[in-house]
Image: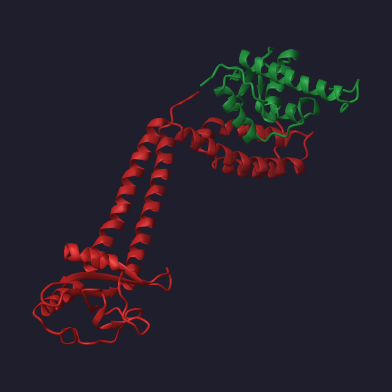
Chain colours: A green, B red
Amino acid sequence: MATGTTPTAPLTSAVFAILLSLAEGEKTGSPSTGLGRWGGKHGYLIMKDARAPEGGGVRLGPGTLYGSLDRMMRDGLVEESGVSDDERRRYYRLTNLGHSALAVELERLDAAVASARSLGLLPHGSRS
Amino acid sequence: MTRTPPQFDRLERFYALALRLYPAPFHDEYGPSMRQAFRDALRDRTLSRRSLIPLVLRDLVTSIAKEHLAMLRDTFARPALIFNALVLAGISTGVALALYAIPQQVLRQGLNDPQLQLAGDLTARLEQGIAPAEADPAGSVDMARSLAPFVIAYDDEGRPLASQAHLNGKTPTPPSGVFDYVRQHGEERVSWQPILGRDHGVRIAAVVQRVNGPHPGFVLAGRNMREVEAREEQVEHMAGLTWIGMLGVIVAGTAVFGRFTKPKTA
């Protein structure tokens, strides 16, 4: 059941990595299903994105991934796209609420990085 | 079509078996997709087997525990189920209390039967004017060790006149409040503790009666409670275990019932 409210508490690393992976897919628009249009990402693609440094460097196993996706669907952050090239593969995409949650989290992290930089904990000009 | 290495098939079969350890609704919903993700990971040449297998094993352990906990949380968050479980827990608590209280009362009441008989007989003889030493011939019951019932005759001031029992070589006297009460009400049944202490104390189930007539006084008939208290303790343990067992059955039953009646959320 979707709750319909943007999460205000910091997201878990798994949830953040999943949202980031799905958002990245939308931006690049790569047709991950092989059906010629953006239809979301399937489980292993999300795991692979999350493992990459730019995806958060989170090592997700299938259990953690699908457990997180199950709760995120109930919270209304992601949904199944309904598009599939293989019945064993399920494809997921962000909802509007998922976009908002990711934006809130990125702003929170950005503010933390800016604060660390102003305190001299992070050199100016370094990647954030 | 590429041929799958046999070790991949074995790993995949093992993973498919391990997936059965997840709660059934979760397994039914995501099992095939998780298996597919594992299959994809096995075939991903950028990912080493050495890092994949420990990751998957760790993930199995943590996520199986997490999903079972989440299922229990969902189950016990349903007010109707919790209400039913609480009602059943209340009933089982009542049953367990009855299992303790009824035998305990039967044991405790039965403990006084010989004393009532002895006290009544001695009181009647003393009221007939028979001398205490003659009516209550001296005995050698050690109140701390023996389970035999005994009687003691006291004068109107509460001083021992004749006794069948002794404790550390002396005839003990109950608190004066007991005599005051018996003077007003005729009889009192008390648990008397002439030596205090949980392990080495002496507890006596005593019946004290008033002696009227030409030489007023009191008669105390008593009996060491040690054996009956041991039986009461056994009854308490049995009732406690029964209570814990019933609560366990209620919790497990509620979890199983909740699992099979879980509303579909998807």
Q: Nearer the viewer, residue A128 or B32?
A: A128
> Residue B36: x and y, percent?
63, 32
Task: Classify residue A80 as left or right of residue A30.
Answer: left
> Residue A68: x and y, percent?
61, 29
Note whether B236 is above or below A55 in the view shown: below
Residue at 39% x, 38% y: name it: B257
Count of all numbered marks drawn on residues in the image: 0
Residue at 34% x, 72% y: name it: B226
Q: Nearer the viewer, residue B38 or B254?
A: B254
Q: Nearer the viewer, residue B156 or B238?
A: B156
> Residue B108: x and y, percent?
26, 65
Residue at 28% x, 82% y: name it: B165
Q: Give the image quarter of residue B166.
A: bottom left
Image quarter (top left, top right, bottom left or bottom right) of the N terminus of chain B: top right
Residue at 25% x, 83% y: name it: B164
Task: Classify residue B115 as left or right of residue A51.
Answer: left
Task: Classify residue A15 as left or right of residue B170.
Answer: right
Note whether A21 is above or below B207 in the view shown: above
| Residue A85 shows up from this direction | no
